[in-house]
Amino acid sequence: MKNDLLNKILSVTVTLLLIPVAHSAISLDRTRVVFPGGEKSVSLSVNNQNKSLPYLAQGWIEDMNGSKLEAGGPLTLLPPVQRIEPGGKSQVKIQATPGLNLLPQDKETLFYLNLREIPPKSNKPNTLQIALQTRIKLFYRPDALARAAVNQQSAPFEEKLTLSKSGDTYTVNNPTPYYITLIDASASSGGETVKGFETMMVSPKGSAILGGKASELGANPVLVYVNDYGGRPSLTFNCAGGQCKVDESKRNKK
């Protein structure tokens, strides 16, 4: 009995190990989208990286809570479904609706853009088909804030972040009207990620606890953020009396 059970477990384990790693066929040309309030639409390129099979691409937009936007929402994605030939390219368009004017105009609003690939039906028996899905952040940026961000490129708004220390913990404070995503925290530029840090997004005019011990980050923590273009610049802070500000002389523009 025990041997039969062990053989079944080993059989399932071997089967799982033989399943190849799935790679997405349908891909987008970016990892985040900023929708400026002054625009009526924003287009994204969609590629079918499979050179032999056509795929369907099904897209939709969700609000920050993960609920799908229904007809009449502030944004819509067109077309909702399309066929992309092997190795082919196409586009999806994020279209503004009159409801966009009802969103807050003094800060960004967060959405999520979803794109699911639907593979062609296989004519082979006992074939496992996996439909992979891409989900990226979509930020609605009111017109005035979009123009302000462009004018601040030499001194990005992310440099207004501050840190405050309490015990052995740093809190990240975001005084700006923009969402800011942090993907790394270390004690020095190019140093190892501090233990306990996890990627985080700080909401407009909000604050959040920074993972990792303040004692390990030291008096000159370095945070890496994702900018509008997918770049990963770093911010070096100077700390004194439990308060930290960005050292603009050590500006990094990766």
Image: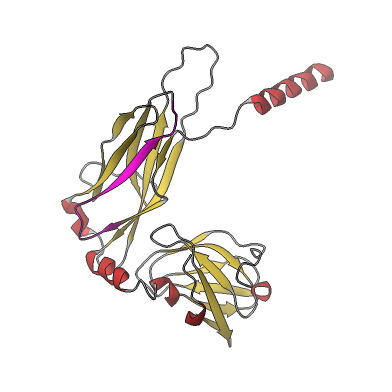
What x and y, as percent, mark residue 59?
33, 38
Q: Is residue 199 above or below residue 164?
A: above
Question: In the image, what residue occupies the spot 19% across and 59% down?
Answer: 101
What x and y, as percent, mark residue 74?
23, 51
In magenta stretch: residue 121: no
Q: Please indicate whether residue 219 sits to the left or right of residue 68 in the image.
A: right
In magenta stretch: residue 50: yes
Bounds of the magenta span?
35-51
What x and y, as percent, mark residue 32?
39, 53
Q: Residue furthest bottom?
A: 241
Q: Is residue 19 above or below residue 225?
A: above
Q: Is residue 12 visible?
A: yes
Q: Is residue 207 above or below residue 245?
A: above
What x and y, as percent, mark residue 226?
46, 61
User: Image quadrant of residue 142?
Assistant: bottom left
Question: In the image, what residue occupies the spot 63% across and 72% down?
Answer: 188
Q: Please indicate whether residue 170 sits to the left or right of residue 53 in the image.
A: right
Q: Is residue 1 visible?
A: no
Question: In the image, what residue occupies the spot 68% across and 72% down?
Answer: 216
User: Image quadrant of residue 88?
Assistant: top left
Query: Between residues 178 and 28, which one lies in front from this camera angle?
Result: 28
Q: Please indicate whether residue 57 sits to the left or right of residue 51 in the image.
A: left
Q: Please indicate whether residue 113 sits to the left or right of residue 36 in the image.
A: right
